Image: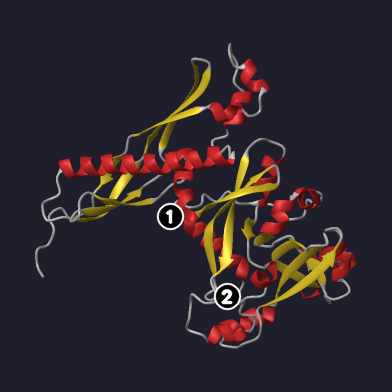
């Protein structure tokens, strides 16, 4: 017997004795959930919507077919754990929720409190906790039963919309996730969850949606953020108000600002990266004071004027940007104080501050509202493009 055969025969014998993995599951035995929606009805029953991927449907949409790439199943129960057993009565495959891409929560459920839901999700370590989280005023059923253009799965569409806000508008910073809500649940920190709504009055529930050229119809629109404290909805901000929020928190890596210097002069500025922020929290005459120094770097995207661009014009633009952002942040802080939204985390900051004079403030949970916030924005335009002298043709 050759050396090769002496080695190969034992290996072949041992391989015949091996068995397949006991917990191996064929993909055709699974109902892979791409998106989950949750709600509560007037009787206190929980509603769970599971958007399940249809692999054959996804393949058909790529080849011009019209089979549905997703199917949505809805279940009702008194607890979140009931849905798994109820799914076996309707869905012919095992529900697999470890890789869903988006989680939709109704505003009604968020207002009632998300404690039970978060405890349920936390109890299952196999669930994906870093997934995108959204709150909607619209019917969760309508959200879960509509087709969107360009993407065959809705969860990916929503995640892309969220990421575009992070990359281009400064109206989101990518923290709207289930695990962020869990991390802040037992603390005083606020969580800002992305809000969405349907861009049309009715959901588009058939694959004829893919035959329509209207891209805006049957789509989702980002509208701002819900403010969540300890798992409870306490308010919301419009998309335009989110810009100064993340700017003063130093979290946004970009934003756009339209600047008007006169009736015939205007420009557009873009922040290039997260601004540098210096925070000084002190007691002045027994009252807490927070001073923020923010130093954003800007790019000149566009300017309309009839003269050569010079350093004097750049300084005017910087000054105007500082003034407008100061006004926006000031207006937001006034609204927050009126609504008792601790956007800057002042209560937690006071609780962790040591020294003479802070003991009395720590004893009063509302003492953060006495904090005086002052702002000093020092922007600098570091990029101006290539157009220095405007064209005079036309």
Report crowding for label 1: few under 14, some 14 to 19, many 20 or more residues within 10 A (C-alpha): many
Specify whether 30 is left or right of 197.
right
Quarter of the image for the N terminus: give it: bottom right
Residue position for label 2 = 201
Report crowding for label 2: few under 14, some 14 to 19, many 20 or more residues within 10 A (C-alpha): few
Q: Position of residue 354 (x, y in %)?
A: 60, 16
Report which quarter residue 367 is drawn in.
top right
Residue at 72 percent of width and 67 percent of height: 33
Q: Nearer the viewer, residue 136 or 183?
A: 136
Residue position for label 1 = 169
Residue at 45 percent of width and 53 percent of height: 240
Q: Nearer the viewer, residue 373 or 8?
A: 373
Q: CA distance from mark 2 to mark 1?
A: 26 Å
Label 1 sits on a secondary structure element that is: helix
Quarter of the image for the C terminus: give it: bottom left
Label 2 sits on a secondary structure element that is: loop
Count of numbered tags: 2
Residue at 56 percent of width and 87 percent of height: 64
């Amino acid at each position: 017997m050759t050396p090769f055969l002496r080695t190969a025969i034992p290996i072949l014998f041992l391989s015949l004795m091996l068995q397949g993995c006991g917990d191996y599951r064929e993909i055709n035995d699974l109902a892979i959930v791409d998106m989950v929606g949750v709600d509560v009805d007037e009787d206190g029953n929980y509603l769970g919507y599971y958007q399940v991927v249809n692999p054959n449907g996804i393949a058909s949409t790529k080849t011009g077919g019209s089979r549905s790439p997703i199917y949505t199943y809805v279940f009702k129960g008194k607890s979140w754990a009931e849905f798994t057993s109820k799914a076996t009565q309707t869905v012919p495959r095992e529900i697999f929720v470890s890789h869903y891409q988006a989680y939709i929560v109704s505003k009604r459920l968020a207002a009632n409190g998300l404690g039970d839901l978060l405890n349920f999700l936390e109890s299952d370590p196999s669930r994906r906790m870093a997934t995108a989280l959204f709150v909607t005023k619209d019917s969760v059923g309508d959200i879960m039963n509509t087709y969107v253009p360009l993407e065959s799965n809705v969860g990916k569409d929503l995640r892309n919309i969220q990421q575009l806000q992070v990359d281009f508008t400064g109206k989101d910073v990518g923290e709207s996730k289930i695990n962020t809500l869990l991390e802040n649940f037992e603390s005083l920190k606020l969580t800002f969850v992305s809000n969405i709504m349907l861009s049309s009055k009715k959901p588009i529930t058939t694959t004829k949606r893919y035959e329509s050229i209207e891209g805006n119809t049957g789509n989702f629109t980002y509208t701002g953020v819900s403010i969540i404290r300890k798992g409870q909805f306490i308010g919301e901000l419009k998309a335009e108000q989110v810009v100064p929020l993340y700017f003063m928190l130093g979290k946004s890596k970009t934003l756009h600002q339209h600047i008007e210097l006169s009736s015939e002069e205007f420009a557009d500025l873009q922040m290039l990266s997260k601004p540098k922020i210096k925070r000084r929290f002190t007691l002045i005459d027994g009252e807490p004071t927070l001073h923020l120094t923010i130093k954003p770097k800007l790019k000149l995207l566009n300017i309309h004027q009839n003269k050569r661009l010079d350093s004097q014009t750049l300084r005017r633009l910087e000054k105007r940007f500082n003034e407008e952002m100061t006004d926006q942040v000031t207006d937001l802080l006034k609204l927050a104080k009126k609504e008792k939204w601790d956007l800057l985390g002042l209560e937690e900051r006071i609780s962790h501050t040591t020294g003479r004079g802070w003991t009395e403030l720590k004893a009063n949970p509302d003492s953060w509202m006495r904090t005086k916030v002052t702002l000093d924005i020092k922007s600098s335009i570091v990029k101006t493009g290539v157009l220095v002298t405007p064209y005079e043709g036309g």
